[in-house]
Image (spheres, rainbow, N blue to C red):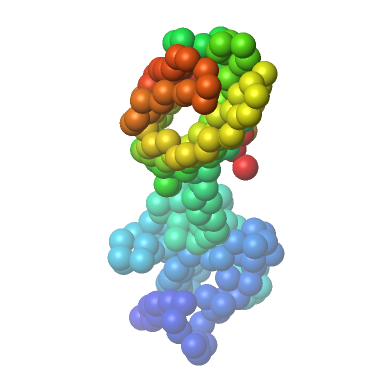
Amino acid sequence: MVLAVWLTIAAAQTSECPTVREVEAEFARILPGTAAPDIELQQAADTLSVRCLAPDGSLLLNRTLAMQGSCAEKAKAAAVIVAAWASQAPLSENKVATPVKVTPAPVPLGLEVGVVAQAWLELTAPIRPGFGLWGDWFPHGGWLGLHAGVFAHTPIDAAFGPGQMHWYRLGGELGPVVKGDLGPVRLTFSPQWVLARFSAWGTGFDSVNTVTDWDGGAKASFRVGLFMHSRWHLFIDAHATLWARPRRLTIEGVDGTRSLSRWTFGLGIGAGARP
């Protein structure tokens, strides 16, 4: 009468030869660093059956070896069969695949900063140089963000009577911003609210006082950029500003009034970067 005893990984003690633990030990020597699959052994007088099971109990491997010998020889032969299967089985059939640690990608900061040199134009005055500094924040790297910046231009000069008038604005801007990327090309549009410190004075007159005041207005800015590197780009900037109040400048003792345009325009080039 043949007595068959099935042994599993969960078996803690057995009198059979070889044991599952002995087969696992040989398997570890053949494939170091790889855990053995679930193994069952069925022994008869001159045969040894080796089976590998999936976690759901389905059969993955079933081999019967016709052999006699010592426990060590049988364990080594069984381990060779299991190792040959484990080295060829797809990962879906081999539950001992080495776990892979996945590091989540960092969330982009979404901050971009830039500097621009501009030609500043009022419709009734000569072109003057100006500059701007700005920052755009796009939460989570999205297409909609917040724009903030500062701007200024050198004094604009205009003849008036026997002398000249001079004026300039220094201010800040704030508003939403939208962007679109077409390969290396970046398109940006931003409607903004602006607030500027307006200063005006004259030269060549007997007595002139400097006038300062606050100007508010609305601005629209459009930029076209080209990324030269993953972190920085060059761009062309064009903007138009409509000031809320008209400005008329007069000099005491001099006939006439100088009316300033409510519209100002700018065209410039600059560079932007992602910190």
Q: Residue at x 40, y 77 (%)?
A: 6
Does residue 162 lie above or below 222 as drawn? above
* Front residue (pair 134, 140): 134
Q: Position of residue 228 (x, y in %)?
A: 63, 21
Judge left or right: residue 21 versus residue 255: right
Q: Position of residue 37 (x, y in %)?
A: 48, 64
Q: Quadrant of residue 41?
A: bottom left
Q: Position of residue 185 (x, y in %)?
A: 50, 18
Q: Residue at x 34, y 59 (%)?
A: 59
- Tell me, yes or no, if residue 269 can be seen here: no
Judge left or right: residue 210 versus residue 245: right
* Front residue (pair 70, 236): 236
* Front residue (pair 35, 126): 126
* Front residue (pair 173, 121): 121
Does residue 275 lie above or below 8 as drawn? above
Q: Residue at x 46, y 10 (%)?
A: 124
Does residue 12 lie above or below 175 as drawn? below
- Tell me, yes or no, if residue 257 can be seen here: yes
Please identify the residue farthest to the front as the structure is shown: 253
Q: Position of residue 202 (x, y in %)?
A: 61, 24
